[in-house]
Image (spheres, rainbow, N blue to C red):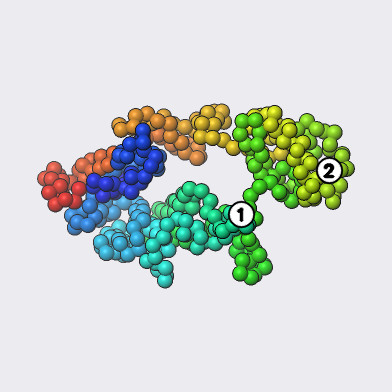
Amino acid sequence: MIKIEPPGSGDTARSMPPFWHDEPHVEASGLFLHLNTNKRSVALDLDTDAARKVVLDLARNADILVESFPAGTMASWGLDYAALEQINPRLVMTSVTNFGQTGPYRDYKMTEITLYALGSTMQVTGMPDRPPLKLGLTVENVYAGMVSATATMGAFMGAVVSGEGQYVDLALMEIQAANQDRAVQGHMIYQYVGGPTGGWTRSGGGSQGRNILPVGVYPCSDGYVQFFTLQPLWDRVCKMIDREDLIEDQHFTAPENFSGNQDVKAEFDAVLLEWLLQHTKREVMEKSQSCGYMCGAINTMEDVFEDPHLAARGFFAQIEHPHVGTLRYPGPQFKMSETPWRAGRAPLLGEHTHEVLTGVLGYGDAEVAELQAQGAI
């Protein structure tokens, strides 16, 4: 996989923290190192005619081209799908933009948080008595990358079968509006209920639930656990906390008390908390799971790195990099029996420029020198 970056600064991710030893450097961004393993870096200044010719030469025999410039940028360079299709009819080209290549919002400037808001999810995240609140980090951008990869591979498989490529126009707003995390459910609720909010408002977090069973975050001796259930699994919770004497206790099991009576819930929470605070989060998770009640420890990053299940499945890979040395990287989120994943580091900026120009495109040393003289590489 060839990654084209501007000379000097490189991909914008190279300037994003965290940095190795907290020292900013184009080769030290943890985000870049993680997202760009197994890629080759070619440094090209696409504002020059010579560099754009290199892209055309690469596209002649490429299977897939993915770009995320603002809508219209590729066309301004003569590198849009209409141009590339002429030299490679098998090419699959994917463009990822905020709002797609058409429509009234096409040229709007947006960040992930504003797209999160526009996609309707933000209206239901946060506490009910406060303004809407976005969930943390850049989950939506990561999800968009997954959608883009899936759509691109689908188009590529079509090209393999038919011999004809196609153009994939992906809009982050549409990906957000169709997100399985709340958005799709909201579409159906709105159509059933109607009204300005569609009957769907912020409910906040916590462990209130629909009955007195634990749902949400609870403390234990060394941190927190997360419980969840949609079923009345009272007997399993009683077994979990070693209180099987409560299974038939009518004070808790009477329908008027079990189904959301907050006073009774507070009583049971007190019993539950007494047990929880005597156990570690891993002990709670293992005991809860053994009783058939869904529970997960809220892991710190240290916990994740030391997790026995991830270790047993060989999730982390040791990868050496010229600038930051050897680090542990998350491996693939899948395992293939016939074509296993191979660990490889992220490239240095422009590391493979000469290799690709001469080895892939067959340029001679004089042509490479001319590109350097023109400021194209």
Return the residue at label 2: 252
- Residue 112: name its quadrant: bottom left
Residue 143 pos. (x, y %):
49, 51
Q: How many marks?
A: 2
Q: Quadrant of the N terminus?
A: top left
Residue 4 pos. (x, y %):
29, 49
Residue 235 pos. (x, y %):
80, 38
Q: Nearer the viewer, residue 50 or 365?
A: 50
CA neighbours of label 1 inside 10 A, class few (<14), some (14 to 19), many (20+): some
Write the residue at 45% across / 52% down. 141
Q: Amino acid at mark 1?
A: Met
Q: Secondary structure at mark 2?
A: helix
Depth-wise, is mark 2 or mark 1 nearer the camera? 1
- The reply, left or right, for residue 369 in relation to residue 357 is left
Return the residue at label 1: 127
Write the residue at 42% across / 70% down. 103
